Image (spheres, rainbow, N blue to C red):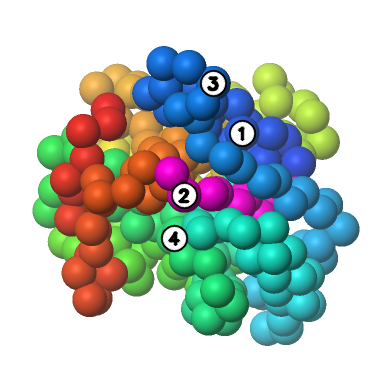
Amino acid sequence: MKRLGVLGGMGPAASAEFMVRLTALTPATCDQEHIPTILWSDPRIPDRSTSVRNGDDLPLPWLIKGVEGLRRAGCDYVAIPCNTAHFWHHKLSGLGPKILHIVDSVAIELKNKNINDCNIAILGTQSTIESGLYQYRLNKFGWNCLTPSKEQMDNLIQPAINLIKSGKIDESKSMIMEVIDSLIAQNIKAVVLGCTELPLAIRDETYNGIALINSIDSLVRLSIDACWENKYTYTNNHEPTQTSRIN
């Protein structure tokens, strides 16, 4: 079995949730069948959203330090339970361990649910939405990605994410659901919770017949498959091909 590194701290609650879900979703029958995992959780990493919007790389040296630390610890794969940090995925990929991509994991999740070639909605931080992190990759795979309006981002989604980061999870849920309701009216088949804080507030798997795709759980499943080996494969253009038996 391969060893997993988790580059966390962005934020700490999302990293903790990833570890809990990794244990819960691993189809192990005893302790020894769980994945050897090392968590590098450093909340001092500069704010990723701010750097993306400012066009600087302030988080990058911290991310590199984390990946190199996980490499020295013998990790074969690295999962990053922070969507916005994947803005630097390409700059981390040559450091040794295979860096799993959270958007690819979401694509696999959508395919597993037979949600193909349709409208889907993407929720995330302002920088994740503005940078096209999800839209660019998923549009290539056949999904048409819809996003909240700027007004919804400014007044509902980003404030809700900030509330979750400050521990006020219950207060955030109604704000997020208001946006989801407006997107459902646009004939979507799924909503991607493309910020790892969002699944801390929205824990349902469906809402009004629409799939809610939890980016933490999708990354957990991809991590399990990677470390258990030979369950997911990728084509050269990074399009995910689902061969997993894990539900």
Give the crowd class for mark 1: few <14, some 14-19, many >=20 residues within 10 Å.
Answer: some
Q: Secondary structure at mark 1?
A: helix
Name which of mark 3 and mark 4 comes first in the sequence: 3
Residue at 36%, 42% in the rendered image: 228
Rounded to the nearest angstrom, the CA distance separating label 3 from label 4 is 27 Å
**Residue at the spot x=51%, y=26% of the render?**
32
* Secondary structure under the numbered disc 2 in the rendered image: loop
**Kind of residue indicated by mark 4:** His
Q: Give the residue type at disc 3.
A: Asp
Question: What residue is disc 4 on?
Answer: 101
- Amino acid at dot 2: Lys
Q: Are marks 4 and 1 in contact (CB under 8 Å)?
A: no
| Inter-mark Cα distance, 1 to 3 | 15 Å
Is residue 8 magenta-colored? yes
Residue placed furthest toward the top: 29
- Using the image, determine if residue 153 lies above or below residue 205: below
Secondary structure found at label 3: helix
Mark number, residue 2? 2
Residue with the most extreme right position:
44
**Residue 236's x, y, as percent?**
22, 76
Mark nearer the N terminus (1 vs 2)? 2
Residue identified by numbered label 3: 31
First in sequence: mark 1 vs mark 3: 1
User: Which label was assigned to residue 19?
Assistant: 1
Residues tagged 2 and 3 counted as in contact (Cβ below 8 A)? no
Mark nearer the viewer, 2 or 4: 2
Tell me which amino acid carries mark 1: Met
Question: In which quadrant is the N terminus drawn?
Answer: top left
How crowded pointer 3 is (Cα within 10 Å; few <14, some 14-19, many 20+) is rated as few
Q: Earlier in the sequence, mark 2 or mark 3?
A: 2
